[in-house]
Image: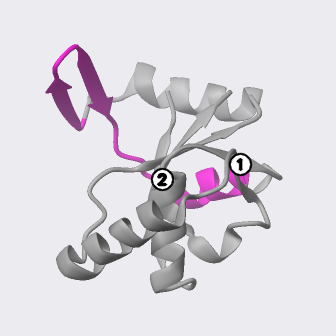
Amino acid sequence: TGLLALIKLSNIGKIIFEHERCVDYKRDQYIQYFKKHKLQTSPIILVHKDMEQINLALNNIISKQEKFFSITAQEYKYDLWELEDTLEYQKLYNKILKFLITDGHHRIASLSKIDINAYGLVFLVPE
C-alpha cells in the first residue's frame, strides 16, 4: 500500500537518493525516449521509513471508500482509491526526510536531465 504522487525532480540528492550509480548510456536512452514520446509510462518507486500516521491514513481510505479503479496485469492486481484532501497527505509526507529510489533510478535521472524543475510520477511505499 502506498501513494501515487507527483514529486519535484529538483529533490534528487536532497530528499531523494539513488541506490546505485546510473549508467550513462541507459540514462541517455531514456532521455531520447522521453523527448520523443513526452510521456513517463510507469511510476518510479520510492521507499521511505514506515510511519504509523501514513499507514493509518491509507488504511482508513481503503476501509471506508469504494475503489476508484482496478488494474490486473499478469499475476498482479492493483486497486486505486482517490484522495479527497491531498493537503492532508502532503503534510504527512512532508515529515519524511529521505526517500530511496528502489526502481526507476535511470528514468528519474533522465527526467531530471531534461528538466530539473519538472515533476515525475512516483509510487511512495514504506520500507
Q: Earlier in the sequence, mark 2 or mark 1?
A: 1
**Which residues make up the magenta segment?**
68-93
The image shows residue 28, relative to residue 107, as above or below, that is below
Residue 124 seen: yes
Q: Residue at x 69, y 70 (%)?
A: 11
Residue lying at 18% horizontally and 31% vertically, measured from the top left:
71
Q: Quadrant of the C terminus?
A: top right
Q: Which residue is mark 1?
A: 99
Figure disc tally: 2
Mark yes or no: residue 6 visible: no
Q: Residues within 10 Å of mark 1 (few under 14, many from 20)?
A: many
The single residue placed furthest to the front in the displayed view is 25
Q: Amino acid at mark 2?
A: Val
Mark 2 vs mark 1, CA separation in Å: 11 Å
Helix, strand or loop at label 1? It is: strand
Please give left or right for residue 121 compared with residue 108 in the image.
left
Q: Residue at x 65, y 77 (%)?
A: 10
Q: Is residue 48 left or right of residue 88?
A: right
Q: Indicate which disc residue 9 carries.
A: none
Residue 47: which quarter of the image?
top right
Residue type marked 1: Phe
To which residue does mark 2 refer?
122
Whole-percent x, y for residue 23 in the image: 54, 59
Q: Position of residue 49 (x, y in %)?
A: 77, 34
